[in-house]
Image (cartoon, rainbow, N blue to C red):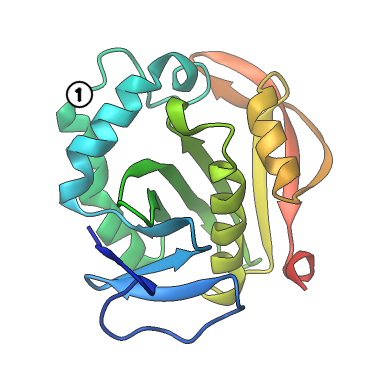
């Protein structure tokens, strides 16, 4: 998982990176790589994101707390700041890549998508995502998921991305499937959430899914 000003050209910053496809750009903002599909963008978290992240989490607490172990009713600003402060070092060490999902038109914080549990030996990682409640059902999670997966292949050089989704979490399954991830099967008692073991569907992306 868990500010750039839009211009007429989209989100811009020093040292832009070449276009990947006509619909998917990689640019940089305040030294943070950002990908955009023209509507939403992915960028690294900054300390200035803490208030927006905190508000989005509490706005979405009912939905998040059922599936995210870190989301609880007493989730504090201190926890938010702690998470954000660890994102940069985690990125630099190659341990995890957490993106803030933002609206490229006004910079509004929409949610988060991230790559974790990175296995360099075998070239795969886990992908997770969440979108604030009032921005769900607008394709935000689907687009962010695809951009993060492409980042894992085109920037990190991985050969597989896995998404583990509880079998009862229908909304997240819908996002994975709309994003084009392939459902491979069920892993029994794979996820422990709030002390309860859950079966989980395993979905995957491989580079060929984007060709």
The correct choice, above or below, for 96 with respect to 7 in the image is: above
| Left or right: 144 as drawn, with respect to 26 | right
Viewer-proximal residue among 43 and 108: 108
Residue extending furthest toward the front: 8
The correct choice, above or below, for 60 with respect to 88 in the image is: above
Going 18% across and 36% down the picture, which residue do you hit?
51
Going 31% across and 21% down the picture, which residue do you hit?
58
- Quarter of the rendering containing residue 197: top right
- Quarter of the rendering containing residue 10: bottom left
- Quarter of the rendering containing residue 146: bottom right
- Label 1: how many residues lie within 10 Å, few (<14), some (14-19) or many (20+)? some
Viewer-proximal residue among 160 and 147: 147
Going 52% across and 51% down the picture, which residue do you hit?
117
Q: Helix, strand, or loop for circle 1? A: loop
Residue 148 in sight in this render: yes
- Residue 47 spot, x, y in % from top left: 16, 50
The correct choice, above or below, for 176 with respect to 26 in the image is: above
- Residue 135 spot, x, y in % from top left: 47, 33
Viewer-proximal residue among 12 and 178: 12
Q: Check the picture and name the quadrant holding the C terminus.
A: bottom right
- Residue 57 spot, x, y in % from top left: 34, 27
**In the rendered image, which residue does mark 1 sit on?**
76
Numbered disc total:
1
The correct choice, above or below, for 193 with respect to 110 in the image is: above
- Residue 101 spot, x, y in % from top left: 41, 49
């Amino acid at each position: 998982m868990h500010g750039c000003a839009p211009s007429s050209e989209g989100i811009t910053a020093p040292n832009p990176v070449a276009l990947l496809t006509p619909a998917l750009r990689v640019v940089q903002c305040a030294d943070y790589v950002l990908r955009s599909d023209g509507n939403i963008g992915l960028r690294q978290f900054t300390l200035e994101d803490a208030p927006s992240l905190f508000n989005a989490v509490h706005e979405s607490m009912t939905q998040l707390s059922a599936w995210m172990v870190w989301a609880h009713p007493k989730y504090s600003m201190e926890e938010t700041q702690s998470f954000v402060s660890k994102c940069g070092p985690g990125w630099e060490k190659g341990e995890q890549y957490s993106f803030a999902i933002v609206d490229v038109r006004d910079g509004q914080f929409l949610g988060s998508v991230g790559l974790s549990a990175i296995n360099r030996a075998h070239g795969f990682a886990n992908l997770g995502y969440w979108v604030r409640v009032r921005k769900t059902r607008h394709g935000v999670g689907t687009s962010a998921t695809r951009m993060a997966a492409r980042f894992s292949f085109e920037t990190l050089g991985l050969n597989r991305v896995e998404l583990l989704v509880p079998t009862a979490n229908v909304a997240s399954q819908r996002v994975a499937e709309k994003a084009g991830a392939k459902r491979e099967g069920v892993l029994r008692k794979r996820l422990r959430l709030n002390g309860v073991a859950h079966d989980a569907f395993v979905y995957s992306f491989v580079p060929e899914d984007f060709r």
